[in-house]
Image: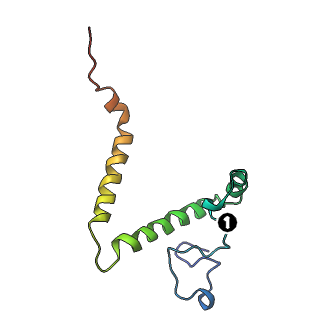
Amino acid sequence: MAIGDYPAEYNPKVHGPYDPARFYGTPDTPFSQLKLGEVSEWINRRNKSPKAIAGLFSRAYWRWSHKYVQPKRATVAPLIHIVTGSMLFFYVINYGKIVRHRNYKYH
């Protein structure tokens, strides 16, 4: 499978039109239905390759896009998400500089 190809698990006769927000692999137990002792086994079953992680982020982006950006009557929510996310990101990367500028009271 090369970049831009359909996933190997996708079958148009079974799944219908391709949806980039859907996982076409074999389903597993959802994380919310796990017991505490099963979490480590569940994490070990995950595919941790770079391609799988890129697919995870791609599906997350398309789910977000289908919900907030692409509806007929989209609101200002995607803009607020992007602005808030960038504010948090820049706060985290500049935290070391911000901490040094605290006002201390010297006696």
Three-letter code, disc 1: Thr
Q: Point out the image quarter for the C terminus.
A: top left
Percent position (x, y) of residue 35? 69, 55
Q: Quadrant of residue 104?
A: top left
Judge the density around disc 1: few (<14), some (14-19), many (≥20) Cα neighbours within 10 Å.
Answer: few
Q: Residue at x 54, y 72 (%)?
A: 3
Q: Quadrant of residue 76?
A: bottom left
**10 w.r.t. 75: above or below:** below
Percent position (x, y) of residue 65? 39, 70
**86 w.r.t. 66: above or below:** above
Q: Residue at x 57, y 79 (%)?
A: 6
Q: Residue at x 59, y 86 (%)?
A: 15
Q: Point out the image quarter for the N terminus.
A: bottom right
Name the colouring of the figure: rainbow
- Mark 1, residue position: 29
Label 1 SS: loop
Percent position (x, y) of residue 87? 31, 48
Percent position (x, y) of residue 55? 55, 66
**24 w.r.t. 99: above or below:** below
